[in-house]
Image (cartoon, rainbow, N blue to C red):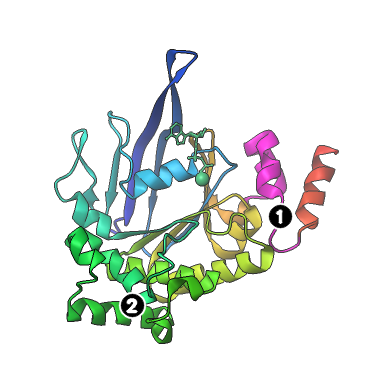
Amino acid sequence: MNTPLLDVKSVSKTFKSHSFGRPASFKAVDEVSFSVNRGESVALLGASGSGKSTLIRLLCGLEKIDAGNGSISVDTHSFYQGTSFAPDIRETRKSIGVVFQQFNLVGQLDVITNVLIGCLANKSAIDVLLRRFTEAERVAALECLDKVGLGPQAYQRASTLSGGQQQRVAVARALLRGAELLLADEPVASLDPTSAKKVMDVLFGLTQDLGMTLIVSLHQISIAQTYCHRALGMRKGRLIYDGLASELSVQRLQALYGADAQEIVTDTFNSPQSSTQQFSTLIGA
Ligand code: ADP
Ligand code: MG
């Protein structure tokens, strides 16, 4: 049987805060379950505040899930042992790469050093500061840069790269860590349509070519439908859709999301007017 690469069961995340001096709590992720097979490209769709970033932080082990019966595993390695992280969580984390919106590159450092920072987990801070990397690590980093088409830029300062090239560096860094699963959190938010397309082309093309599995959070249905076969829809922390991206028609989105559908349908990607107009017609605006 084909075991999924990522398996998420009944995962919740509650944030505690104080409201007018009283303790309050807010469930940002609410009993979410799904699994993803190797090689899939999945869009995580939802309006802002629906819990996408929180879920991504849970999936890469940056945040801990609420104690209870929830579980996350990657390649059958469970993140948790009881309510604590499992002893091999550092190893498990290496199989997951995360591309944040800002790519987290150090502009003053050259590209190869930015990739080598990806193997930070095995290094002391001093080694990294003094850039004490072994020859084998440098060769491996160059190989990863070659794979993403950035071999010639290895010794260029990261700040001189274009947005699309910076994203390739972020992917090369994940590759060096041995990541199989790539999580990208709103990689195209706040980009103009042309840059958004370039960034998605790079992200999607690379992960396909390299046989990686991709989960990309988005709040635009058009982008999800252009690149991803499958969509996971979140609303108010809950998973309200798990199916084909192509089946999310404007009508379906409105039924699922109500007023929040506007944010998901408003299309800044392919044809800025069309789906907004469709939506306005639909709701009689
Ligand atoms: P999205 O990425 O879909 O915009 P987020 O996961 O960032 O959504 O946020 C979901 C909800 O959780 C929001 O209401 C947000 O304010 C809340 N939230 C996120 N992180 C924290 C935190 N560290 N403390 C308190 N509330 C948080
Ligand atoms: Mg977010």
Q: Position of residue 76 (x, y in %)?
A: 23, 53
Which residue is depicted at the point 38% across and 67% down? 212
Answer whether residue 148 is magenta in the image: no
Q: At 39% across and 63% down in the image, what residue appears?
A: 213
Rendered image quadrant of residue 235: top right
Mark 1 belongs to which amino acid?
A: Asp
Q: Residues within 10 Å of mark 1 (few under 14, many from 20)?
A: many
The amino acid type, in three-letter code, at marker 2 is Cys
Q: Closer to us: mark 1 or mark 2?
A: 2
| Circle nearer the N terminus (1, 2) | 2
Judge left or right: residue 130 versus residue 251. left
Residue at the bottom extreme, as displayed? 152
The residue at 71%/47% (across/down) is 250
Q: Is residue 131 left or right of residue 16?
A: left
Q: Distance from label 1 to label 2 (Cα)? A: 34 Å
Which numbered disc covers residue 267? 1
- The N terminus sits in image quarter: bottom left
Q: Secondary structure at mark 2?
A: helix
Q: Secondary structure at mark 1?
A: loop
**Residue depicted at 41% across the width and 38% down the height:** 32
Residue 16 lies, with reference to residue 129, above or below; the image says above
Quadrant of the rendered image containing residue 162:
bottom right
Q: Nearer the viewer, residue 152 or 92?
A: 152
Q: Give the magenta-colored segment's residue range.
A: 248-271
Q: Quick check: 284 left or right of 131?
A: right
* Pointer 2 residue: 144
